[in-house]
Image (spheres, rainbow, N blue to C red):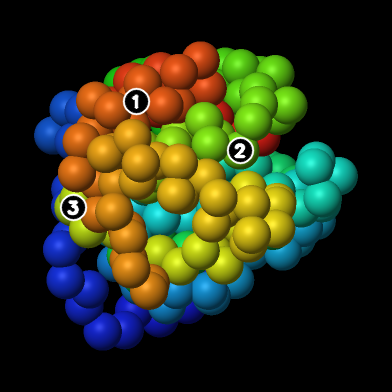
């Protein structure tokens, strides 16, 4: 999806993938890009459409949902640690699934064909994008094995992943949204959230979740955590 930029989003973070590149490599990519923003709930891409752009996320969270995987469960999350559309970094590709902005998002958007041109003429860019794609695939394979986990660990892992990408301890997210992302009923999310509150890991009110003890939340997530920090897989079916 290509679009014109609009209102600036507060709380911008520097994209970690771009920051990790050399200055010349980064500028070579950004010379072809523009900063764009998206509203929560806005569809970024639809299945089988050509991947025309790569979006290096600065703020917010994009999520992809696979209808064939656990009844439309969100397959992966991408925040300021990564890029949306990575499948097209080396060769022309189509979107395998719908991609939705789950919270107000801002990103550097670069035409995929131009990103490929830069990648194949600059080894540093090629190495960074190839490594990110490989790490994402590894996270996918690990998360697929976790789909049978009980709800409370999966919710804990999802909240950790959201905090890694959204930044603050105060997460603006509804129980309906969490249920949709996990592919479960809202009542199941309510029960899991009460478990995490009883463990003194979180507290919550309408439309907001506060992480009050990250260590306790990590303990609740247990084996559903793959990776660490900003590179964490979600512990849900991830792509």
- SS at circle 3: loop
Q: Residue at x 32, y 60 (%)?
A: 204
Of residue 138 and residue 228, the one placed in the foreground of this image is 228
The residue singled out by tag 2 in the image is: 151
Label 1 Cα crowd, 10 Å radius (few <14 / some 14-19 / many 20+):
some
Q: Position of residue 15 (x, y in %)?
A: 25, 45
Q: Tell me the mark number nearer the camera, choosing from 3 and 1.
A: 1
Q: Position of residue 3 (x, y in %)?
A: 47, 77
Q: Tell me the mark number nearer the camera, choosing from 2 and 3.
A: 2
Q: Residue at x 55, y 50 (%)?
A: 191
Q: Pick whichever of labels 3 and 1 is earlier in the sequence.
A: 3
Residue 191 vs 121, above or below: the answer is below
Label 2 Cα crowd, 10 Å radius (few <14 / some 14-19 / many 20+):
some
The residue singled out by tag 1 in the image is: 218
Marks 1 and 2: in contact by CB < 8 Å? Answer: no
Q: Position of residue 113 (x, y in %)?
A: 55, 49
Q: Which mark is residue 168?
A: 3
Label 3 Cα crowd, 10 Å radius (few <14 / some 14-19 / many 20+):
few
Of residue 238 and residue 55, the one placed in the foreground of this image is 238
Q: Residue at x 41, y 55 (%)?
A: 61
Q: Is residue 34 left or right of residue 89?
A: left
Q: Pick whichever of labels 2 and 3 is earlier in the sequence.
A: 2
Examine the image and state in which quarter residue 100 appears: bottom right
Q: Position of residue 105 (x, y in %)?
A: 36, 65
Examine the image and state in which quarter residue 6 appears: bottom left
Q: The N terminus appears in which quarter of the rendering? A: bottom right
From mark 2 to mark 1, how far is it between C-alphas? Answer: 14 Å
Of residue 211 and residue 11, the one placed in the foreground of this image is 211
Marks 3 and 2: in contact by CB < 8 Å? Answer: no
Q: Residue at x 51, y 63 (%)?
A: 175
| Residue 32 visible in the snapshot | no
- SS at circle 2: helix
């Amino acid at each position: 999806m290509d679009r014109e930029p609009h209102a600036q989003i507060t709380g911008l973070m520097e994209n970690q993938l771009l920051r990790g590149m050399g200055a010349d490599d980064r500028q070579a990519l950004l010379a072809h890009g523009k900063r764009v923003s998206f509203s929560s709930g806005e569809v970024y891409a639809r299945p089988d459409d050509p991947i025309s752009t790569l979006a290096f996320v600065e703020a917010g969270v994009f999520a992809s949902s696979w209808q064939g995987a656990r009844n439309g469960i969100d397959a992966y999350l991408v925040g300021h640690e990564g890029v949306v559309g990575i499948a097209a970094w080396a060769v022309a590709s189509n979107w395998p699934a719908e991609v939705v902005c789950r919270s107000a998002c801002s990103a550097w958007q670069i035409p995929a064909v131009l990103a490929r041109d830069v990648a194949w003429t600059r080894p540093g860019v090629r190495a960074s994008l190839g490594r990110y794609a490989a790490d994402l695939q590894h996270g996918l394979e690990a998360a697929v094995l976790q789909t049978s986990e009980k709800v409370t660990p999966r919710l804990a892992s999802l909240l950790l992943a959201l905090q890694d990408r959204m930044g603050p301890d105060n997460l603006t997210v509804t129980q309906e949204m969490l249920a949709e992302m996990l592919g479960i009923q809202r009542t199941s999310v309510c029960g899991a959230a009460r478990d995490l509150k009883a463990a003194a890991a979180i507290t919550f009110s309408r439309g907001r979740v506060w992480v009050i003890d990250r260590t306790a939340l990590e303990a609740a997530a247990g084996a559903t955590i793959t990776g660490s920090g900003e590179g964490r897989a979600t512990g849900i079916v991830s792509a």
